[in-house]
Amino acid sequence: MFGKSNKPSPIDSLIGAGTVIEGNVSFKGGLRIDGCVRGNVTACDDKTGTLVLSEQATIEGAVQGRHIVINGTVAGPVSASEYVELLPKARVTGDVTYKAIEIHSGAIVMGRLQHQASFRGDKVVDIKSAGGAPEPARLARGESHE
């Protein structure tokens, strides 16, 4: 909205069916995986990284990107700075961190779903102790200081 685009990046690269990569993969733009990656798959930046895993895809490692669409198998944590979509054949063994998520019927997550707030860091405020000296205190997200 207002100049910000939340559209996923177009697919620039493909790891084809039958291809096995042993090692970490870093990508820019969009990446579709139909094969197997034994290592971490990470977008180079959180502004354009879109990852799509087909039904045949397998990743054994951590996955990070802006938009992540899974219809295959991931054995490791998944972290999306914006959006995760788990299609019906998705199988994730690991925690899923997201800002927005869509889970289709049939998708399985064996781990925790962790919502990532849209802001970073805790709010720090000064609270006066009984002695009158200010002490820094951290408020939990959602609390307010009056």
Image (tube, rainbow, N blue to C red):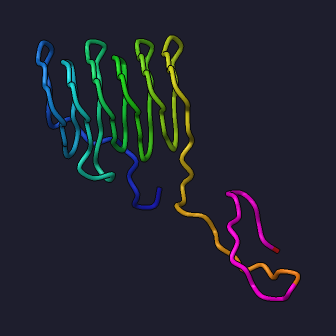
- Going 28% across and 24% down the picture, which residue do you hit? 60
- Residue 125 falls left or right of residue 75: right
**Residue nearer the viewer, 62 or 16:** 62
Classify residue 145 by image quadrant: bottom right
Q: Is residue 141 magenta?
A: yes
Give the vertical position of 54 relative to 8 (above or below).
above
Q: Is residue 38 above or below residue 99?
A: above
Which residue is nearer to you in this view: 132 or 36? 132
Examine the rendered structure and indicate whether residue 8 appears above or below residue 108. below
Between 82 and 124, the residue placed more toward the observer is 124
The residue at the point 72 percent across, 80 percent down is: 135
In the rendering, at what x and y percent does residue 62 appear?
33, 34
| Residue found at the far right of this picture | 130
In percent of width and height, residue 104 lies at: 51, 19
Q: How many marks?
A: 0
Which quarter shows the C terminus?
bottom right
Q: Is residue 107 left or right of residue 35?
A: right
Residue 34 included in the magenta stretch of the image: no
Residue 130, horizontal then vertical, whole percent: 88, 81
Q: Label the magenta part by its dominant secondary structure.
A: loop
Residue at 52% x, 40% y: name it: 100
Pick whichever, 10 or 73, lies toward us: 73
Q: Is residue 119 above or below residue 55?
A: below
Q: Residue furthest front?
A: 131
Relative placement, left or right, of 73 versus 135 is left
The residue range painted magenta reads 131-145
